[in-house]
Image: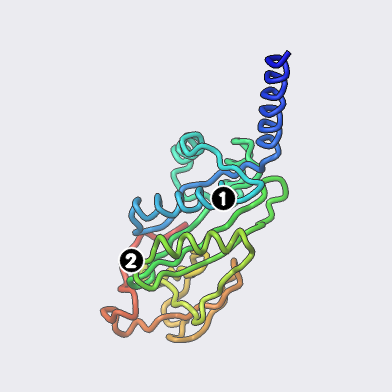
Amino acid sequence: MKRIVTVILILNFWALVCNGQDNLKKVAIINPDGKNVSDELKTILREELSSIVVNTSGYTVLEREEVNKVVKARRSEVNIEFSESELREIGKFLQADYVCYAIITPIDNNYHISIKISEIETAKIVFQNTGITKNGTGDFIEVSRKTANNMLNNKTEEPTELLKAVVEDSGDNYWVNCPYCGEYKLMKKGSYISGEKYKCLKCGKLWIFPDLSNSGNNQNRPLREMTPRK
């Protein structure tokens, strides 16, 4: 009789565990994007995101290998950076409830981190936050962890000072990279004003066009030739 009772208790326990897991919202975390950013920093940010999401009540994270397999197959087809809609399609294929993606943008000697979590069904961005290092790679882990943690707790921290855009030379034009969301804007040379504030049409945040008169100055990122974007 005692054995029967014990077996029943064990079965009930596992039923509760399985039911609890079924109720968890599944999050597909995509490896962060970032030009001129090492794979090591991308891996660090992804692992920090995974750790914080999986330890947040009500959420679970899909296996990295499973996500990477789908991403790799898609990349071989398109061979470009994914748009937000394409990332949601990947999440839908993985039967996830949410997709989490991030962009790391080098700014002078520091890194700007932008993280978003979109709901697959509604395409709505439900969580979003940004952060920027003050000591290069020295505080990258700390800033990654804080940015992700504050995002899930709805504690978005805005920088106290406006960031400078990242500018790349492309012949008669400049490609200007929003330091917050990574969106590129094509600006004809001579149409900009150094130190002037501009608004990103994608994320709505203000950024400053840097002074390009001295590209060797540590306050500005040197211009570099690039293949024009389509």
Query: Disc number at residue 53?
Result: 1
Residue 51 or 92: which is nearer the viewer? 51
From where the camera sits, is residue 185 visible? no
- Residue 209 at x, y = what percent? 45, 80
Sequence-wise, which precedes: disc 1 or disc 2? Answer: 1
User: Disc 2 designates what residue?
Assistant: 138
Q: What element carries label 2?
A: helix
- Residue 178 at x, y = what percent? 49, 69
Residue 49 or 166: which is nearer the viewer? 49
**Horizontal relation, residue 128 to residue 76: left or right:** right
Distance, label 1 to label 2, CA atoms, is: 23 Å
* 10 Å crowding of disc 2: few (<14), some (14-19), many (20+): few
Q: Residue at x 41, y 69 (%)?
A: 133
**Horizontal relation, residue 4 to residue 46: left or right:** right
Identity, as a three-letter code, of the amino acid under mark 2: Gly
Indicate the quadrant where residue 10 lies.
Answer: top right
| On screen, residue 94 above or below 199 | above
